[in-house]
Amino acid sequence: MAARSESLRREAGRLLAVLDVAGTRVMVDPTDDGSVIVHRKRAGISVGAGRFGIADAEMLVRQDLARWQHGEAAQRTLVLSEAGRSYLRRASADVPEAAFLHQHRETVTATIQTKVGLTRVRMDAEESPLDWLRRRRDRNGVPMIDEAAYQAGERLRTDITLAGLLPGVTARWDAMPTGGGFVSPSEATDRMIAARQRIRHAFDAVGSDFSDLLMDLCGFLKGLEQIERERGWPQRSAKIVVRLALARLAEHYGIEAAARGPAASRGIKSWRAVVIEGGRA
C-alpha cells in the first residue's frame, strides 16, 4: 500500500465509511461539480442520504482509498478500493495489536461463558469452514447448511479437540518424554476417553464414506476447495456431499432443525459419556 502523505480529514473519513455501506452510491452532483451526493436504496427506491465536498472525495482517491468509476453519460461514481476496505478493517480493531488480524481476516463479536462470567470477545469468523458454510447463502437466500447441521459439526469438532486426535503444530516444553515410543495410554484422561468413544459412535453411525470427510471438515478445518482438490472431485460438488454428511451426523446426535415437541423427540433427556465396566457398556 502506497504511503499517504496527508492525514485523513474527518469529513473524508465519514465519506469513506459511507462507501462501505451496502446499497450506497456516491456520485458527482450533476448540478454542482464541487460536491458529491450519496444515494441509498430503500424498498427498491433510490433516495438522497447526504452530501460531501468534492475535495474529500479527491483526498480519498489520492490516498488510494477510493477510485472514480465512469458510468453511462460520462457520470463519475466514487467506489471503495481494496486499500480503502483494508483501511476500514484496521480502523475497526479494538486494540492496535489486532489491526493486522482485522485487515486480513473476517472477525465477529461474540459472547462466551468464562470462569468470571459472560465475556464479549472477538473471534475469527473464517477459522472454521462450518461458520463459512452457515454464513454463505444460495441464490434463493437459504444458508448452505442449516442450524442443525452446524450444531452437529461443532459438537464433533469439540469432541475431536477434547480427544486429542489432532497433531500438535508447536513445540511442547512440558511433559517431555524421557524415552522413545508413544505416550502411555494411562495418561489419557477420562474426558479424552469419553470424547473418543463419542467420536467412534458418531463415525459408526455416519458410515465410512462420510467419516474421513467429517474428520477433514470438523477436525483439520479444511475448506471445500481443498477437499475437492485432494479428492479429485468436480468443482462445487463438496458442498453437496458435506450437506449429506452433516445431515446424517445431526440425525445421529438427535439434533433437529426445528422443535417438534415431545411426541416427535427421541426421548433423549441428557448427553452422557459411555462408561465401560467389566468389559460391558
Image: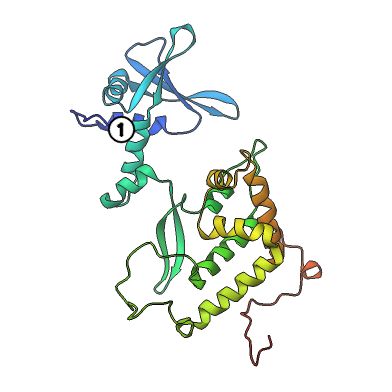
Task: Look at the image and tell me whether residue 143 can be seen.
Answer: no
Task: Look at the image and tell me whether residue 2 can be seen.
Answer: yes
Residue 14's image quarter? top left
Q: Could you say where residue 231 lies in the image, as x and y percent from the top left?
A: 59, 47
Establish if 99 lies above or below 8.
Answer: below
Q: Judge from the rendering whether residue 179 lies leftward or rightward of residue 8; answer left or right.
A: right
For the point 30% across and 22% down, the residue is 61
Seen from the viewer's position, the closer of residues 250 and 266 is: 250
Please tell me how crowded label 1 is: few (under 14), some (14-19), or many (20+) other residues with Cα within 10 Å: some
Residue 104's image quarter? top left
Give the amino acid type for the residue marked by disc 1 in the picture: Gly
Seen from the viewer's position, the closer of residues 160 and 147 is: 160
Q: Could you say where residue 260 lies in the image, as x and y percent from the top left?
A: 76, 63
Is label 1 in a helix, a strand or a loop? Answer: helix
Q: Judge from the rendering whether residue 136 lies leftward or rightward of residue 280; answer left or right.
A: left
Q: Residue furthest right?
A: 263
Q: Quadrant of the C terminus?
A: bottom right
Seen from the viewer's position, the closer of residues 128 and 79 is: 128
Q: Residue furthest front?
A: 180
Q: Could you say where residue 27 lies in the image, as x and y percent from the top left?
A: 42, 18
Q: Could you say where residue 182 lies in the image, as x and y percent from the top left?
A: 43, 76
Mark 1 lies on residue: 13
For the point 76% across and 71% down, the residue is 266
Q: Quadrant of the N terminus?
A: top left
